[in-house]
Amino acid sequence: MASYKKPRIRDGAVRRFLFVVSLTLAGVLLLLFLVGMISSNEIDDSRSEFSFKFNTSGLIKSIKLPKHNHLSKMLENRNQLPPRNMDLYPNLAEKRIVIVLYVHNRPQYLKLVVDSLSRVTGINETLLIVSHDGYFEEMNKIVEGIRFCQVKQVFAPFSPHIFPNSFPGVSPNDCKDKDNPIEKKCEGTTDQYGNHRSPKIVSLKHHWWWMMNTVWDGLKETTGHLGDILFIEEDHFIFPNAYQNLKMLTELKPTKCPNCYAANLAPSNVKSRGENWDCLIAERMGNVGYTFNRTVWRKIHRKATEFCFFDDYNWDITMWVTVYPSFGHPVYSMRGPRASAVHFGKCGLHQGQGESTACVDNGVVKIDTEKIDKVVNIKPEWGVHMISNQDGYQAGFRGWGGWGDKRDHQLCLDFADMYHVRSKTS
């Protein structure tokens, strides 16, 4: 009896030993995986929220972006180049606010904006990113001439402007205007008003969304950025005190207006230069010189479906009507009582150059810069005046259209996923 039990005891011990070893190895492998994931996390500056930068090689899901042409592939490769002027400005401020200037094809406007930026106090301590909607040589040359700070150019490689014969540009079989797809045997789905897509119109929303995803999640210069990012456009004149005012606003916002999502350089009413009151202003987020952090971006990114399916080609109207309301409470932005940026453009973004119907005002703009616009004009002891009832789009507004094609919806969703899942071009 004893001789029978001893081998069973030894066998049981071996099995227990192997089980412990297996469990230990599994634990070690899990720990290594978690360490790898955490090392690639980005910690938000304001609320210590973890935002995972996924290891795409381990994901099953994939997206299918449009097939590259020669120009788009060249631009995508160029996006990987380091910033210029690093020899002139080798050290950036630790608490810098990165500036993103997104441009289309209005060189007469861009020259004015670049000139105004060159006079901004403190701009040499930060990085300027210029995001191009496609490639236009004159626009490129203007940016290449910047010497007042570090500057990085990125080009939307899937802009309709660089696909003349295929989607996202104009495909030979595309429906036009109000064509009936069955009768014309053409491709496309209409917006709510019965109109087919116009590539130069849809490019506005595509570029903004591609830019946001790329700046926050796709560039090595900014994926680890822990502070705020300022977004301006090629028809926004920036006053010399803008950067210093903005640093003050972002420092005061957590205590003065903890429920504010952003800081703005200008009132939401683009025709206003401000109230000149002795207080800070909290109102709905405007589209001139808006600044927010990674926590806000994550909330926006989670609403990709709402953004991509709302039938309006304007990114800002889409945000105001469908994305911000989906947060469940008002979205306020804090600003000073005097604008540090103004919108001066008369030509719409879709009215570019090189067409017989192009909008041209020769960039003749006179904007008075007073002494108060050259110094910090925000005081930390000021209180906050909340503007809660503002004119805007009412509940039930369905959008201005121009964004009804299912292919645009899918490309928009792919832009939201392109830095988080494995992607491939068709």
Image (cartoon, helix red, strand yellow):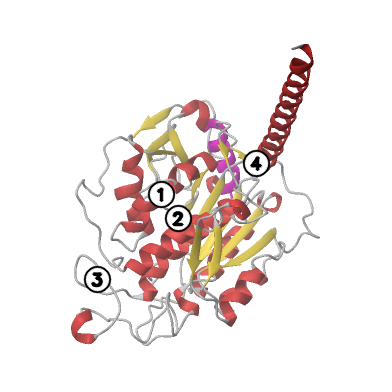
User: Which of the two marks, 3 or 2, is nearer to us in this view?
Assistant: 3
Residue 368: tell me if it is visible.
no
How crowded pointer 3 is (Cα within 10 Å; few <14, some 14-19, many 20+) is rated as many
**Which is more toward the observer, 353 or 298?**
298
Q: Is residue 293 above or below residue 304?
A: above
Q: From the image, tell me which residue sits under label 4.
A: 37
Question: Quick check: is 148 in the magenta stretch?
Answer: no
Q: Which mark is residue 342?
A: 2
Residue 311 place in picture, x, y as percent = 28, 60
For the residues labelled 3 and 2, the Cα–Cα distance comes to 36 Å
**Which is more toward the observer, 55 or 123?**
55
Q: Is residue 324 left or right of residue 79?
A: left
Residue beneath the point at 43% across and 45% down: 302
Disc 1 residue type?
A: Arg
Q: Which mark is residue 273?
A: 1
Q: Could you tell which of marks 4 and 2 lies nearer the N-terminus?
A: 4
Q: Secondary structure at mark 3?
A: loop
Q: Could you tell which of marks 3 and 2 lies nearer the N-terminus?
A: 3
